[in-house]
Image (tube, rainbow, N blue to C red):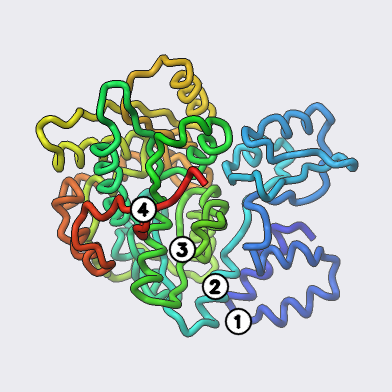
Amino acid sequence: MTIKKLYERLLKAEINGQLNEELDRLKEDAYDPYQIDCLLNPEKCTPVWRLGQCNCSDEEKEHCRASCLFEAITIDENGNAIIDPELCTGCAECIELCKESNLAERKDLIAALQAVKSSDAPVYVLIAPAFIGQFHKDVTPGKLRSAFKNLGFTGMLEVALFADILTLREAFEFNKKVKSEEDFLLTSCCCPMWIAMIRRIYKEFLSHVPGSVSPMVACGRSIKLLEPGAITVFVGPCVAKKAEARESDIKDAIDFVLTFEEVAELFEYTGIDPSRLEEDDRDHSSLAGRIYARTGGVSEAVKLAVERISAENSLAVRPIQADGIRECKAMMQSLKDGEIDANFIEGMGCVGGCVGGPKAILDREEGKTNVNEYGSLAQHVTPIDNPYVIELLNRLGLTKVEELITEDSLFSRDFLN
């Protein structure tokens, strides 16, 4: 039995309330107990799974091994790809390159549904800014929130609101650290592949990286502070978020990570059509937070925020961006070679940004258009003008927005240690 068929059987059984019975039936079939353990306890497993024996040629195996920028793939004595859990960032490039379709992303959906059913604690969906239009062109944020509530989740929060908060933090960091034409800041608050590349390959630039968590982590930590014991489920187009959520210094924030494809499967198997549901509107994020989902969005958001909060003698933001992990590496090499004079450097691991993520449902150009249109509908342009940001910060114990850059802030992270 392939792991894909095993996953489908267990997922349908969990949805129908028959998981234990299905597990008993599987004892009579040929199955791999390790695969079942990974499906029920995904936190134990790597972000990328090998589905079976590697039957490709030695040349193709070597190409697979060499394709990993982070050297997370080795080939064992039996000729099978081995994924190192400490090195794998979940970039998913190996999944795309595998000609045998023998690699796949980890599945968190069954475990997340078990948490919804078995826990008395509230369970919140944290939806990534790239979600607009992913499930159907008529699925508004309000209808999507209703769909999750119908499935038993307590509610849905847009991570774009926390992208607003991180935009403010990085704008203050820019004003604090970039004091001359030679200074520069490497953005840290969005893409885990970008950060992994800097931390592992270009360590000499870490002092230029502001110590910020990602919007996903900021959202998860905030929920858990305001509602102790709450369970958080991030939903987005990214496999790398599954790896980020397990990093030792930030694993307190997110309990499960689902991709858009996993959620689409959930809607299909439960017969829920979000486009037909009622609206449950909550409009809290600004344009700046909503455009994080596409290339250049972070730079544009921080530039707007710096211009809004800066004194007249502050340096202007001169951004440069790269998308795609190899393009990001090329940009960093150019920086190392002294060929870049920008002072705000943004990297996105996927071409097009998050809308080009490996588990996005839409074509990235359509996703980008949707994100831009959604951003244009925001009531506020910058986070500093967004009353919901200020209200949330106050509820979290921050009386001044400048307190965002304190080292013990809920939104801080130490990349140097």
Determine whether the residue tagged by mark 4 lies in a helix, strand or loop: loop
Is 115 placed above or below 383 here? below
Q: How many tags in the picture?
A: 4
Q: Residue 181, image x and y in percent? A: 27, 21
Whole-Å distance between the Cαs marked 4 and 3?
A: 18 Å
Q: Amino acid at mark 1?
A: Gly
Residue mark closest to the camera, 4 vs 3 = 4
Q: Residue 155, image x and y in percent? A: 36, 72
Determine whether the residue tagged by mark 2 lies in a helix, strand or loop: helix
Is 326 placed above or below 13 here? above
Q: Is residue 352 visible?
A: no
Q: Amino acid at mark 2?
A: Leu
Answer with mark 3 or mark 2, whichever residue precedes in sequence. Answer: 2
Q: Which residue is mark 3?
A: 253
Q: Which picture quadrant has residue 298? A: top left
Whole-Å distance between the Cαs marked 4 and 2?
A: 36 Å
Answer with mark 4 or mark 3, whichever residue precedes in sequence. Answer: 3
